[in-house]
Amino acid sequence: MSMVQKICFFYFAALMVAASLNYIPGLTDDQGLAFGIFALDLYDDALHVASALWALIAGLRSRRAARIFLILFGAAYLGDGVFGFFTGYGFLDMGIFTNASLGLDLSLGRILANLPHLALGGFALWAGLRDARS
């Protein structure tokens, strides 16, 4: 099993954890914010589960499928995190299409809200592109 396939299994687990955050008592506050930072809704949960299943299938299928997952997923999630800084909303859950832009904000709250997509997306893209050169 290749390293990119193993990374896909990590993404499967991480994304399933993300999808479960709203359903673990004590992780959301009175306003429905996970860790008091960001709100997750049914669309976000569905996106995380779909992405997790894609990661699992890619990891089980082949090195090539895993590499493609990492590149496409990485670009999409990294881009979503960048959009979050500039607008306050991402495009993967259609937030930029249904909400007015909040403008650029580099506050700690905005950074923490977008950090998961920036980190997961950035690492996935890096890993997929790095493997493509080998």
Image: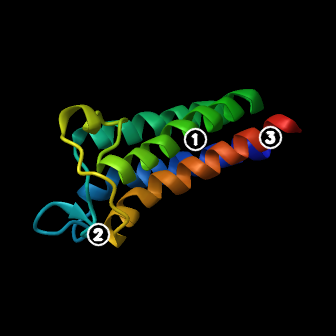
Extreme residue toward the left, this view: 30
Residue 36 seen in the current view: yes
**Nearest the eye: 37 or 65:** 37
Say which element carries label 2.
Answer: loop
Which image quarter holds the N terminus?
top right
Say which element carries label 3.
Answer: helix
**Residue pictured at 45% horizontal, 48% vertical:** 82
- The image shows residue 65 at horizontal and vertical percentages of 68, 27
**Nearest the eye: 88 or 36:** 88
**Residue pictured at 71% horizontal, 40% vertical:** 128
Mark count: 3
- Identify the mark at residue 131; answer none if there is no mark: 3
- The image shows residue 41 at horizontal and vertical percentages of 22, 45
N-term mark: 3 or 2: 2
- The image shows residue 7 at horizontal and vertical percentages of 67, 48
Mark 1 to mark 2: distance in Å? 24 Å
**Nearest the eye: 130 or 87:** 87
- Identify the mark at residue 35; answer none if there is no mark: 2
N-term mark: 1 or 3: 1
Residue 1 seen in the current view: no
What is the three-letter code of the residue carrying label 1?
Gly
- Identify the mark at residue 74; answer none if there is no mark: 1
